[in-house]
Image (spheres, rainbow, N blue to C red):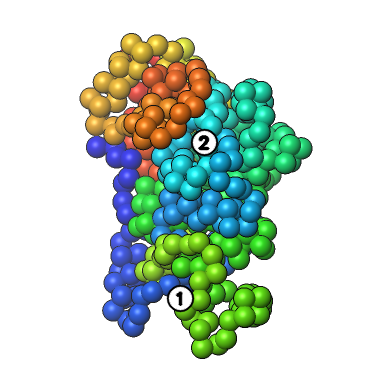
Amino acid sequence: MIKLIKSAFVNEEETRKELADFVLKTPLFSMSSECKKFEEAFEKKQGRKHAVFVNSGSSANLILVQAFLNLGRLKKGDIVGVSAVTWATNIMPLIQLGLVPLLIDCEIDTLNVSSKTLRAALEEEPNMRGLFLTNVLGFSDDIELIASICAERNILFFEDNCESLGSSVGGKLLGNFGIASTFSFFVGHHLSTIEGGMVCTDDVDLYHALVGARAHGWDRNHTKEKQDTLRNEHGVTPFFAMYTFYDLAYNVRPTEINGFLGNRQLVHWDTIVSKRSENFKFIHDAMKANEDIIPLRFSHMDIISNFAVPVILKTKELVERYKELFEKNDVEIRPIIAGNMMHQPFFNKHVLKRGHQPNADFVHNHGFYFGNNPELTSEEINLLASLLKRDK
């Protein structure tokens, strides 16, 4: 069977042996030097000034929203636009923290929010204060123009890049267009630390707010300079400093095991990205002449690095036919993320304003995806390509 997740790690056998040795030799496993080393290496590879490592991509979203609130850049009751095609934990923190999510429709041929759908949402809700954009399945639309619109209208723009590590537009990696971006290192994503996530930013004040929000709101993980600033501002003596909490926060720290794995997997970044990109191009070449399938638009992109390949069919009947074909050939398939989030029970329970997202509905009802990972064999890639050709 061609599974979405083929193995726990890239270079799995060696990684497991190294992990076993690390566990046997390491005295303590709470967040320390391995995690810090991973943060520094990741921020350098992504091309951002700061990175904050946490225990999941979902936690990355949570502390990013909390940090914006702590800094006063968002306020309870503010409306934040979100991609209609996304993951639940991009929207849940907004609801949980008193913000109002507004679903923004996608383009069918990129699966992503575009400047056109953003402008339509702004006509509906001109008081939008933030935009949490998901870079869906390695793709983007005109993200440079989206960033420009947000800057012009003073909209706080941030990205979920959990599915698109290594994808780039105009020589710039996705995840580097907004003030901050989140990443996931769940086992099914590009880099696996079993569970894990990261927030990246160039904004030093936001970085400090993220560090605080990650662990209790205390100052233990701050630089000495930042510690002195906080203690002087609040009149905290050294005796009480270890148990002083400066703002709202959580405990979403990763472990040294996660950090160790991140450091071992990060060296494979280039291989992972190039292999996923090559796989996608080969498979897309096979499917682009198939008139059953709606063509994807990505000529504006330099690199497409996705963890799964989407297929959007023109009719519901075709969807069922191709789903049956893939399942018959032992290929694991899934919906396009979670489809249009408007149809999720939690959303209908907690959000009154649902709007209308016809393109996201089309994707919801006419699509599925299958796995793209760097360990696919030539035989498996050829099989996937053959299933997407016109003649059946």
Residue 254 seen: yes
Residue 105, picture quadrant: top right
Q: As drawn, is 151 to the left or to the right of 211?
A: right
Mark 1 surroundings: few (<14), some (14-19) or many (≥20) residues within 10 A: some
Give SS at disc 1.
loop
Residue at the (28%, 32%) spot, across then down? 331
Quadrant of the image for the N terminus? top left
Q: As drawn, is 195 to the left or to the right of 236?
A: left
Q: As drawn, is 66 to the left or to the right of 123?
A: left
Residue at the (34%, 83%) spot, across then down? 27
Q: Nearer the viewer, mark 2 or mark 1?
A: 2
Residue 15, picture quadrant: bottom left
- The answer to which of 44 and 223 lies nearer the viewer is 223
Numbered tag placed on residue 32 in the rendering: 1
Residue at the (46%, 29%) spot, across then down? 352
Alpha carbon separation for disc pair 2 and 1:
35 Å
Residue 310 seen: no
Residue at the (63%, 54%) spot, across then down? 72
**Residue type highlighted by circle 1:** Ser
Percent coordinates x, y for residue 346 in the rendering: 36, 35
**Residue type highlighted by circle 2:** Pro
- The answer to which of 196 and 301 lies nearer the viewer is 196
Quadrant of the image for the C terminus? top left
Residue on which the image places disc 2 = 101
Q: Which residue is most to the right?
A: 152
Percent coordinates x, y for residue 274 in the rendering: 52, 46
15 w.r.t. 8: above or below:
below
